[in-house]
Image (cartoon, rainbow, N blue to C red):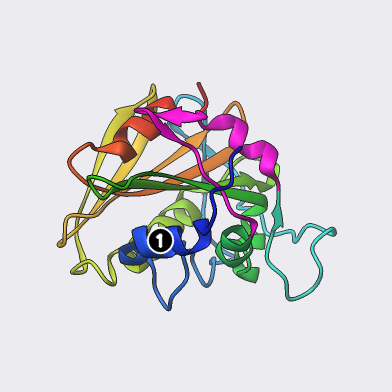
Amino acid sequence: MRRAGGLAGLVLVAASATAGCGSPAPVPSTIPSSAASASVTASGSPEPSTAPSAIPSASPAGSGIAIDPTLLDLLPRQLAGLDRQTDPDVDARAFGDPGLRAIGTAGASAIYVDPAAGDFAYATLIRLVGGRIGNSAFRAYRDSFDAGACSQAGGVAGNAETTLGGRRTFVGSCAGGLLTYHAVIPEAGVLVSISSAGGRRLGEQLMTAAGG
């Protein structure tokens, strides 16, 4: 990992279109405890289960989820010639929401920025409770993430599905051109969400490379 000087400010500037209420990473404020009747499996097909509701004992009451830099091993050190950059202050803000404890135990984030073109891809990774997430909980997370991401980018304009990196990937689009990507890496039990903008389509490239 490489931490660039002033990276917290860089993330806030580059990802400002993705943020609600000034947070560098849009995260759901609540996760429905009753969410979901099915979990995402390696094949991408639903499997009956109960949505995780346990709060990890390691998380103090009122806190978010732990920061685990080893999650970044799922992301390339370089993407299209751009270095992976991180900042602990950004992570603290991105994963400080107590609502995340309903679905995850730890998180980490990174950004890839092309300063010349203004293109960027900002990724958040969440290690899932029990290594899986119910379909309804996943949908609620995506909807909340996309609403925050698009709040300063013209609002949510649409949703689609595709396959990237061999995984079922949910793609959200904002009226202002920002794109979001969401997928579960089942073998790692990790949820990856990406906010991206620019003609280089760094978000698509990053989701394809994640977990590889």
Q: Which residue is mark 1?
A: 145
54 left or right of 127 in image = right
Mark 1 closeness class: few <14, some 14–19, many ≥20 residues within 10 Å: many
Q: Which region shows up in magenta?
A: 68-88
Residue at x 58%, y 40% (from the top left corner): 2
Residue furthest to the front in view is: 5
In the rendered image, which quarter contains the N terminus?
Answer: top right
Rendered position, 178 above or below 72 = below
Placement of 158 over or under 168, stated as above or below: below
* Left or right relative to 54: residue 172: left
Expressed as whole percent of the image width and height from the top left, the position of residue 103 reads 61, 55
Pinpoint residue 187: horizontal percent, then vertical percent: 60, 26
Position of residue 192 measured from the top left corner of the image (x, y, whole percent): 48, 42
Tell me the amino acid under the disc marked 1.
Phe
Magenta segment includes 70: yes
Question: Which secondary structure lies at badge 1?
Answer: helix
The total of numbered circles placed on residues is 1
Quadrant in which residue 169 is drawn: top left
Q: Is residue 179 magenta?
A: no
Quadrant in the rendering for residue 188 = top right
Is 121 displayed left or right of 35 in the figure? left
157 vs 13, nearest the viewer: 13
Q: Is residue 155 above or below residue 157?
A: below
Q: Nearer the viewer, residue 64 or 159?
A: 64
